[in-house]
Amino acid sequence: MAESRLRIAIIGGGLAGATLANVLIQIPHVAVHVYESTPEFSSRGAAIVLTNTSQKSFQRAIPSAPDILKKTGAVPKNSTQLILGSGPEAGAVIADLGNSGTPGLVVSRFSLLRELLSLLPKEILYTSKKLTKIIAGGDYVDILFEDGTSSQFDAVIGADGIFSSVRKHVVGTAADEAYSASPAGFWDSRNLIPYEKAKSVLGEEYFKLDRQYGWIGDGAFIMHEFLEDRAVVQCVISVIEKDPPKDRRKRQLTKEYLTEILSNWLDGPIAKGMIELTLDQPEPSGYSQWEHKLTLTYAKDHVCIVGDAAHSMTPWQGFGAGMAIEDAMVLGVLFRNISSPQGISAAFKAFDAMRRVRCERIIHSSQGTGVIMCGRNEEVGLDVDKFRQSLFSRWDVIDAIDYDVHEQEALEKLRETLTGGN
């Protein structure tokens, strides 16, 4: 390894870490290593939706993105139908949304991570490496692991999830509690069901088109969509959480519990079938949705955080993975424009300046969208016309971005910092 190469450690081998590693290995003067704390690389959750905006940033970050997505068995989300799931108007169609441009893609998390990792040299991937300490000084960072080993790098990037160890170093122990992740007010259950079984339970009428179905109702939201080349259906129940736990431990789901919380849905067309499918798994469970409402900074000297470690969010606007991809895209642009360890701190400051405002705006928009979609927004309630008026403009905060401008502004921030400007 040439001495002139910047040595970068990525802590966390999930989607955010693997995406970033694929971006950084394209840069000749960067040497990247990926450390995963568990015995194998994995990604929690069933599927994600990559919107048109996410696909654009993905291809900017990794030019082979279309081939990667094809190998995952991604299914185009050609349309979304939103339907009222409870109340006197249950079954009424709120909206039938087509795609005027590139359709969104429903992608298996596992398959996407598999394809991203397959593109990385095996010698830069490490498992069972749990970070215990970061010692930063000057232009270098030492990282220590639970197994007693240590390494020195020019920079460390934390992609180690919502309860990130790297985040604590960046934000600072004193401020960690004030800026740590907290319950967002919802829990959800996600389950993958064989296509034919899901069709037989939910009804053939909901399987004629490759579309996402979302059911809005009293205190909950239900969704189903196709993935893995239409071999399986992701079934989701999301519910307003009245008693959030102090951690993200699993919530055991029983027929009695689901029947109680969806009691106002049972006369509608979807709840009974979804309860049946949710319970048809070894350990029916729900998980609280947590988010980082605010974060003091995404960077400290030669250490920074990306993905859920920086900006964990609720899934209501389907852009958690999209924000991680944007992080990787911007860091790739910045690292292409520095050549020595002395430029890393400036690059991370520019990253923080560009990314934090946008990510926190989307975090808050997503949480508010969840309240509407669970029928608990006081102004909207379960009024079909008000749903139509309030929901669809909320995605403007995500899609109204020019990536050429976003990248150029990041470079301007980098130059200002390098030259001592404000």
Image (cartoon, rainbow, N blue to C red):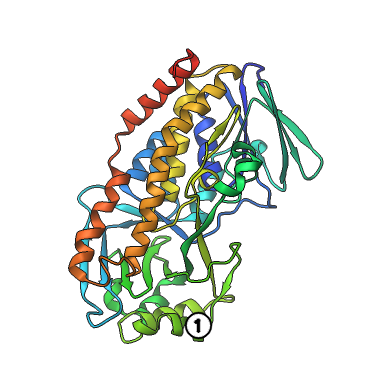
Q: Is residue 234 visible?
A: yes
The residue pinned by badge 1 equals: 257
Relative to 220, does residue 276 appear above or below in the rendering? below
Q: Residue 60 occupies which quadrant of the picture?
A: top left
Residue 231, position as x, y percentages in the image? 42, 66
Quadrant where the C terminus is found in the figure: top left
**Which residue is at a point 47% across and 36% down the rendered structure image?**
328
* Residue in the image at 35% along x and 69% along y: 374
Image height of 17 relative to 211, above or below: above
Quadrant containing the N terminus in the rendered view:
top right
Is residue 72 found left or right of 405 in the rendered image?
right
Q: In this view, does 5 lie above or below 135?
A: above
Query: At which x and y percent is residue 189?
Result: 48, 69
| Secondary-structure class at tag 1 | helix
Residue 208 visible in the shown view: no
Occupied quadrant, residue 13: top right
Q: In this view, does 81 lie to the left or right of 7?
A: left
Foreground pick, 384 / 150: 384
